Image (cartoon, rainbow, N blue to C red):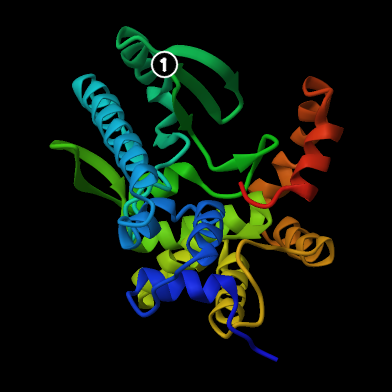
Amino acid sequence: MPRETETLRLLKTLLGLYKPSGGKVHKLAEVAKLNKLLLAYLRRVGDVLRDELLREEARYRWFVRNAAEVVDALNGVGVGYALHKFRKPVDHVSVDLDILVKVDDVPKAVKALVRRGFEVAVSEPYTVTLVRRGFIVDLYTNPSFAWVVYMDGEKLLRCCAEEIEVGGVKANALTKEAEVVVAAAHAVYKEHMVLLMDCLIAWAWTGRGVWSLAEELGVIKALETLYSICRAIEAGYIEAPYKLSIAITSRILSEKFVRDPVFRVTTINMLKYAFEHRDIGAGMLNRLLRGSY
């Protein structure tokens, strides 16, 4: 039977339809944090959690300021790029800045950021991670996990980039429709978990083009799965974050293996990844036990 879940109370709070009180204020703050919606939630209940709101607003300004500097650095050297998993229907403080970069432009992008004080922390197939004073930038050539490619980054850059503004600086970013598709693929193929934030993206920006784009990029099953879970969340049957079961994840990845030649070919990289990351067992256990990502 459907019920008034904590997720629905959070959603109603964000929509201005519910005002938490007492212990619910702090409880929903925890739920909001797990769903990457803490800033949006605190803005709704700011008078009650004012200190937390001020800290989160400061973190948001810090994130935007750093993101704008990164974008300015890439613009200055003519890198082909698009901010990836960046645009949300509500303001959000991310743990890192994800950027899709043309393969040939990765060295140029890395040099531009190193000149701004960043250091290369990790360099792997399809990803270079740079860090500066706690700010993390991930440069991707293809969206991937464990060195397995689940979306074509070059195709995303060709079909789905547009100009936006970040902290007063012009930036290239994925279109809103592309962000829906990316959110679905990331949640289902990589994280095996759906957040309320993923649902907000899907509900806000889905149009007819989203489905054709998902089909073109070979992630239609991920989009179908996201919508199915979001409907269950909205109906009050399940809470978010929602972990996909091992059975569902295995079935979806098996279908991806059969239908997607790039995914199939790069799956062998999992063995190389396991050899390079000897702590992969602990990592897998953490993924099974975690409450969010």
- The correct choice, above or below, for 211 with respect to 262 in the image is below
Q: Which residue is mark 1?
A: 133
**Front residue of this view, candidates 137 and 66:** 66
66 vs 133, left or right, is left
- The correct choice, above or below, for 123 with respect to 139 in the image is above
172 vs 246, left or right, is left
- Which residue is rendered at x = 53% and y = 80% of the image? 234
Local secondary structure at mark 1 = loop
- Which residue is rendered at x = 31% and y = 32% of the image? 80
**Front residue of this view, candidates 26 and 148:** 26
- Which residue is rendered at x = 45% and y = 21% of the image? 134
- The quarter of the picture where residue 119 lies is top left
Q: Position of residue 193 (x, y in %)?
A: 65, 58
**Front residue of this view, candidates 53 and 222:** 53
Hey, which residue is sitting farthest front in the picture?
22
Hey, which residue is sitting farthest bottom in the picture?
1
Q: Position of residue 280 (x, y in %)?
A: 81, 31
